[in-house]
Image (cartoon, rainbow, N blue to C red):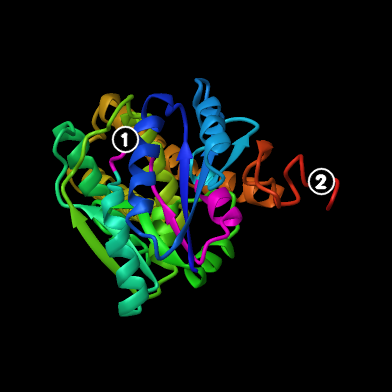
Amino acid sequence: MEKITVVVPCYNEEAALGAFYQEISALARKMPQVLFEFLFINDGSRDKTLEKIKFFAQQDERVKYISFSRNFGKEAGIYAGLENATGDYVVVMDADLQDPPALLPEMYRYIKEEGYDCVGSRRVDRKGEPPIRSFFARTFYRLINRISDANVVDGARDFQMMNRDVVQAILSMKEYNRFSKGIFGWIGFRKKWLEYENIARVAGETKWSFWKLFLYALEGILAFSTAPLVISSVVGLVCCILAFVMIFVIIFRTLYFGDPTAGWPSLVCIILLLSGIQMLGIGILGQYLAKTYLETKRRPIYLVRESNVKKLPCHSREAQISC
């Protein structure tokens, strides 16, 4: 029988895990033609998330877990899940039930019967979100698709099912600074999108503040586009041209009309403007250098503190002896 591994990154999801486990277990019973593996990734949770996962593992041999040594972020959780999944097909989904498990049979059918490599999901609306957050989200999707070759679909979720070819393609991209939405779009393959309306969390609160989403968006732009560097160079060139034009205008007015240069307030404004543009350009360059610096360190994407998975990557504590 074929196996489906469900990868569930968790960070302080104690309140939602019970409902999620009941839903995914009920769904598995409706698909007797395949085996299931539930791989929970505890991303350094501070509540009793790990304890609840261990309880599930004691009752159900299908439940596996990997607990990080600290919070490494959802991107590391997704990578760890894909790296340790043993199924023929792998599903990535959240524990808050905003990713409806009821879509799994349809996802499996599209891959198995219609030959798709991956089936993704996207929200068709943003009910319940603040209007300003929705505006910036849509603006980000439009922007990144224009300045990069990563096909990031508006409303796309991390919730998707993929075959082994897609999983291996994602794992081959071992960069430390990861942006999964961009990676999923960049690798290509034949992909089907399923649409559904936004669903509220079953319990708990979102871990994504506006500031965290803003930083995540910047991470995506820096990871898949060099357009900010080009824009910085163009702005610098335009400022230089304007400066030369103004120099000739001032010289012409002074020689032919005897018009002295205006007072210092305008000069101060110009100096502040150009200084701000220079600092912006240096800041953009610094961000790319910082990402390069982190990549060259070749640090592991995550570190494992505890797990019931038999075979772990060599950078985990349990696997270091065998490696």
Q: From the image, tell me which residue sits under label 2.
A: 320
Q: Quadrant of residue 152?
A: bottom left
Q: Quadrant of residue 189?
A: bottom left
Residue 38: image tag: none
Q: How many marks?
A: 2
Q: Amino acid at mark 2?
A: Gln
Q: Nearer the viewer, residue 81 or 106?
A: 106
Q: Nearer the viewer, residue 46 or 51?
A: 51
Residue 204 percent location from the top left of the image: 33, 24
Residue 16 percent location from the top left of the image: 36, 30
Q: Report crowding for label 1: few under 14, some 14 to 19, many 20 or more residues within 10 A (C-alpha).
A: few
Instruction: State the extent of the magenta-drawn residues as a range.
Output: 78-98
Give above or below for 38 relative to 70.
below
Q: Report crowding for label 2: few under 14, some 14 to 19, many 20 or more residues within 10 A (C-alpha).
A: few
Is 81 in the magenta? yes
* Disc with the residue nearer the chain's start (2 vs 1): 1
Cα–Cα span, label 2 and label 1: 59 Å
Give above or below for 62 relative to 109.
above
Left or right: 182 with respect to 201?
A: right
Which residue corresponds to the image point at 37% horizontal and 63% vertical from the top-left? 148
Residue 321 percent location from the top left of the image: 86, 46
Residue 270: image tag: 1
Cβ–Cβ under 8 Å for marks 2 and 1: no
Q: Nearer the viewer, residue 126 or 146?
A: 126
Secondary element type, mark 2: loop
Secondary element type, mark 1: helix
Residue 292 percent location from the top left of the image: 60, 51
- Residue 258 shows in the view: no
Q: Amino acid at mark 1?
A: Ile
Q: Residue furthest right?
A: 321
Give above or below for 270 relative to 102.
above
